[in-house]
Amino acid sequence: MKTVFSTDELPVSERTEAWVAATTESLVPNRFTFPDRATFGARLQAMPLGASQLCALSYAALYSRRTPALIRQSDPEHYQVGLIRSGRQGIDQARRRALVGAGDLVLYDSSRPFDAVVPTSRPRSESLLLQFPKNRLPLPERQIARLLAVPIPGSHGVGRLLADFLGTLAAEEAAYTVRDRFRLEGTAIDLVAATLAHHLDRDGDLPPESRQHVLFMQISAYIEQHLADPDLGPARLAAVHHISLRHLHRIFQERHTTVAGLIRQTRLDRCRRDLADPAQRGIAVHTIAARWGFQDAAAFSRTFRTTTGCSPTEYRAACLTGPTHPSHR
């Protein structure tokens, strides 16, 4: 991600003022207090997503306050969803106070005053922050307000989908085109809406296209987590997600793929990754295939050759000896 600000090359005397200016420009104006200006360090990286933005933040102990006066001065009318990656942070908004830690998600509203703190007893805190226009969220604002400053688990369910998606966005930012970013913005907001609706128990308020999009992502995540199961297939997926087979196939048809096709491609991707890994050079090809759900070694070899144009053994040799294989060009 593009680094907007870093204290690494700034004199100690300039760091805190530069941080205030950078966050005012990239996020929203806040009033800051720094317990130890002499040791303060921070970094801010940003990735535009249409009208939204994903930021990666790292900072030492600080206290920030968004006051009514600052809101009157500048309010983009955004929601901010933070994913805490390390450390702990305290947040106080809408008469709620919470302490959130690694793996937690938390929602802020730029139009309401809030207080946030990174305790002095902790190392640098790291987080991802998704900021997007409030009018993009297809849920009533009065309902959303119930979840401000409420810790939301990012370790399971729809919350995990959102957390994983934000992490992948940040890690692979360089691979996205401008058009990709507009599409990814919609996916991110759909996942935020689904996560909030789940915790509000108001899934029915989501637009049908958002529900279908999130359901497809849930099914895809389930596939990735159960690739080793040889019985993974449409019947299992439909039962686990409480939908009919017809509904399941329609979801995949709308995305120009099939259940079997996605399972096969995901398994092949995992096999290709492991075959190209020097640390797994000594593991037999058929063992890697079985690890990802290909129980018939001969059938795996045929499928692999049809997809890549070479056998698994040839692919491994090409990957481990140099970028000569077509897949590397």
Image (spheres, helix red, strand yellow):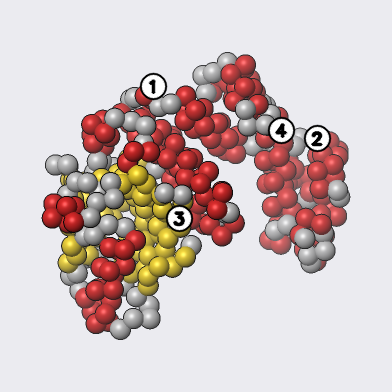
Camera-side mark, 1 or 2: 1
Q: Give the secondary structure at mark 3.
A: strand
Disc ID at residue 204: 1
Residue at the (72%, 43%) spot, across then down: 268
Q: Quadrant of residue 190?
A: top left
Q: How crowded is mark 3: few (under 14 residues within 10 Å), some or many (20 or more)?
A: some
Q: Where is residue 61 in the image (x, y as percent from the top left)?
A: 24, 66
Q: Is residue 196 shown above or below 241?
A: below
Mark 4 and 2 residues: CB-CB less than 8 Å, in contact?
Answer: no
Name the residue tied to disc 2. Answer: 296
Camera-side mark, 1 or 4: 1
Q: Viewed as shown, does residue 323 lie left or right of 7? A: right
Disc nearer the start of the sequence (1/3)? 3
Label 1 – label 2 distance at C-alpha: 43 Å
Out of 35 and 278, give the one closest to the viewer.
35
Disc nearer the start of the sequence (1/2)? 1
Residue at the (82%, 39%) spot, across then down: 303
Disc nearer the start of the sequence (3/2)? 3
Residue type indicated by callout 3: Pro
Residue type indicated by callout 4: Gly
